[in-house]
Amino acid sequence: MTETTHLEAKVLLLEHDPTQYQLLMDFCASIGLLPLPRTARDALSTLAEHKDLAGVLLAEDLPGCEPDSLGLAQAIRKQRPELPTFLRRSSQRELTEAEQASVRLTWQPGELQALQDGVHRAIFSLRYPTALVDGIVELTIESMRSMFPYAQVRAESPYVVHDRIIFGEVSTLIPIESTWCRGYMMLQTEEGALRQGLIQGFSYEGLGGDFNFRELNNLLGETTNLIWGAFKNRYIPPQAFTTQQIQVPLVINHAHKYMSFGSQDAQLCIRYQLSDPRRPGMPPLMIVQRFIFNLYWSPEGFAEFAAQSAAAVSTGELDLF
């Protein structure tokens, strides 16, 4: 199997006990979780603020929750049912059916191995080849620089998400299919930030004036198409497609900015910051990229494809067309 990269994932950390808090902070650092420590009072507002979470670590005896935090666990599940909640038990009482449905795993102090196994199953359910992730970042940055030649493009560290909340108001979606994967790529951004970036001249010199939403949609669509073309040229063999032609319905709820691809697997997420080197004080334009391999995913198939491509390149034979 090809080398895979262990991507990070953001989790909401709701823990008050000093000993358990430090243990969980160390635990998160050891397996690639990025904790967001919060209290019961601001837990739900944090969910509203962060659209790229992968799970929740919750203490049963969290202060501010009466008689315990199971009510909060149910509220979290109602607001974000795709996020797995890992509950640290502090009592022996039997959970009700509704309470059991609101948590993915219960664990006791001293059972960090069980917690780690549960996190790997629920959060890190897919592993991504390092060469693929690095290649995606490279070709995306090149494509964005072509579309926004006067912007400075920087990619943040890739990570995985379980959230299904759409970032911003403008989104594009394009299918991706190869011998080793089937799914979609998305680009998402805020309409106002994209408009401001164009006014600043990200796309071409001297750009000014206003832009309607159709023009903004078209620009993000062209960027998506350029990235897809680069992905296709690098990673999709022209002669072969996967034979698993299954389909699942996509669910879009515009009122809640929610989109589901019918899969509970983690999604590969990369955030790109586009800034103006001539105006360092201006906030950057953020474009969020997601890869959702919900229909077929085979890292082993990618490794085989990459090996064949490398062999073809290194033959030294001269092709005549």
Image (cartoon, rainbow, N blue to C red):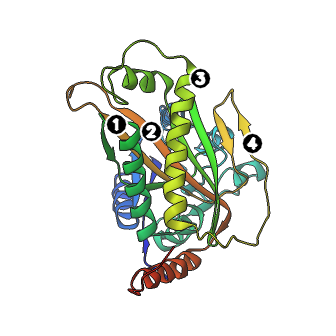
* Contact? badges 1 and 2 (CB < 8 Å): yes
Q: Secondary structure at mark 2?
A: strand
Q: Residue at x 44, y 38 (%)?
A: 287
What label sits on residue 274 in the rendered view? 1
Q: Position of residue 157 (x, y in %)?
A: 36, 53
Q: Secondary structure at mark 3?
A: helix
If you read the primary sequence from the N terminus, does the residue marked by circle 2 or circle 4 appear first?
4
Reading the image, the residue beneath label 4 is 251
**Can you tell which of label 4 and label 1 is closer to the viewer?**
1
Query: Tag 4: residue type?
Result: Val
Reading the image, the residue beneath label 2 is 287
**Can you tell which of label 3 and label 2 is closer to the viewer?**
3
Q: Secondary structure at mark 4?
A: strand
If you read the primary sequence from the N terminus, does the residue marked by circle 3 or circle 2 appear first?
3
If you read the primary sequence from the N terminus, does the residue marked by circle 4 or circle 1 appear first?
4
* Contact? badges 2 and 4 (CB < 8 Å): no
Q: In screen coordinates, is 125 left or right of 6?
A: right
Residue 302 shows in this picture? yes
